[in-house]
Image (spheres, rainbow, N blue to C red):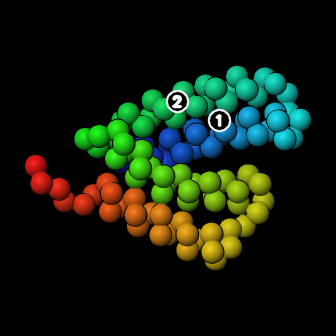
Amino acid sequence: MTTIAVYAFAAVAEIAGCFAVWAVLRLDASRWWLAAGLVSLVIFAMALTRVDAEFAGRAYAAYGGVYILASLLWMWGAEGMRPDRFDLVGAGLCLAGAAVILWSPRPA
């Protein structure tokens, strides 16, 4: 899997897991959602270990930009609220930062 695909998969797993908790605590969903959310969060954590990065901190920092974009897409697709231009500009800045962190040339 490519780095972008791993990050996208991880983002869906993390957001789904966190949304399960949100649904229980804020939307009065069944507590069974917590079990599914826990499984989803474990999958998220395992997925991030597949990123091609030398250090965990760098992999997590770069993932932040992808997570922000995925969160806005979740808001739009799952919650029906379309991101505004400030959301999109902010996500673009974060993705640019993530690219710098992950793919900048570094001395060996």
Horizontal side of 65 relative to 52 (left or right) equals: right
Query: In the picture, residue 77 is in which quadrant?
Result: bottom right
Q: Compared to 72, does 44 lie above or below?
A: above
Q: x%, y% of residue 63?
A: 44, 49
Q: x%, y% of residue 102?
A: 31, 54
Residue at screen point 77% across, 54% down: 79
Horizontal side of 100 relative to 87 (left or right) equals: left
Residue at screen point 63% across, 58% down: 73
Labels 1 and 2 touching (C-beta < 8 A) = yes
Horizontal side of 26 relative to 85 (left or right) equals: right
Does dot 2 land on a helix, a strand or a loop? helix
**Cα distance in 3D space between marks 1 and 2:** 9 Å
Furthest-front residue in view? 57
Looking at the image, can residue 5 be seen?
Answer: no
Kind of residue at badge 1: Gly
What is the number of callouts on the image? 2
Q: Which residue is mark 1?
A: 17
Q: Which residue is mark 2?
A: 43
Furthest-right residue in view? 28
Mark seen at residue 1: none
Q: x%, y% of residue 12?
A: 58, 44
How packed mark 2 is, by other alpha carbons closer than 10 Å (few <14, some 14-19, many 20 or more), is: some
Q: Compared to 82, does 40 lie above or below?
A: above
Residue at screen point 38% across, 33% down: 49
Query: For the N terminus, which image quadrant?
Result: top left
Q: Compared to 48, does 99 lie above or below?
A: below
Kind of residue at badge 2: Ile
